[in-house]
Image (cartoon, rainbow, N blue to C red):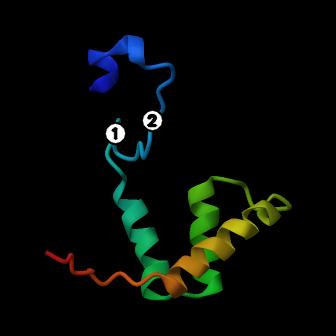
Amino acid sequence: RFAHRFPARVRRLGLLAPAASFRPIAWQFYLRGAIPQLYPSRATVTWFVRWVSARPPGPADAVAEPTVRQFGAGLRHFDARPVPIPD
């Protein structure tokens, strides 16, 4: 809204978190994304990252390795419990 109201004050504009902005997220994404959450293992995370990255199997899988490590670390160390906000 700011960019529309004050275009002279905006030099560049970027789109953040565009998921579901233009098209709804497919149910397959939720289903496949739940499997590594329910059964966190290197195999399920690798399976999901390969599917979501849309790369054909083969030598390009080495590119996904840092993503698999990051995703796995998030599954292990992220605490999804709500944090109370002090008054």
Pointers 2 and 1 in contact (C-beta within 8 Å): yes
User: Residue at the spot x=86%, y=61% of the render?
Assistant: 59
**Residue 21 has which mark?**
1
Which one is nearer the viewer's eye here, 57 or 68? 68
Q: Badge 1: how crowded within 10 Å, few (<14), some, or many (20+)?
A: few
Q: Residue furthest top?
A: 8
Q: Residue furthest front?
A: 87
User: Residue at the spot x=47%, y=26% of the render?
Assistant: 13
How many callouts does the rendering have? 2
- The image shows residue 40 at horizontal and vertical percentages of 52, 87
Q: Secondary structure at mark 1?
A: loop
Mark 2 = which residue?
15
30 over 80 or under it: above or below: above
- The image shows residue 16 at horizontal and vertical percentages of 44, 42
**Kind of residue indicated by mark 2:** Leu
- The image shows residue 33 at horizontal and vertical percentages of 45, 70
78 over 29 or under it: above or below: below
Which mark's residue is nearer the viewer, 2 or 1? 2
The quarter holding residue 60 reads: bottom right
User: Residue at the spot x=59%, y=88% of the render?
Assistant: 41
**Kind of residue indicated by mark 1:** Ser
- Whole-angstrom CA distance, mark 2 to mark 1, is 10 Å
Q: Badge 2: how crowded within 10 Å, few (<14), some, or many (20+)?
A: few
Q: Secondary structure at mark 2?
A: loop
User: Residue at the spot x=51%, y=85% of the render?
Assistant: 77
Q: Quadrant of the C terminus?
A: bottom left
60 sits left or right of 50 in the view: right
Which one is nearer the viewer's eye here, 22 or 18? 18
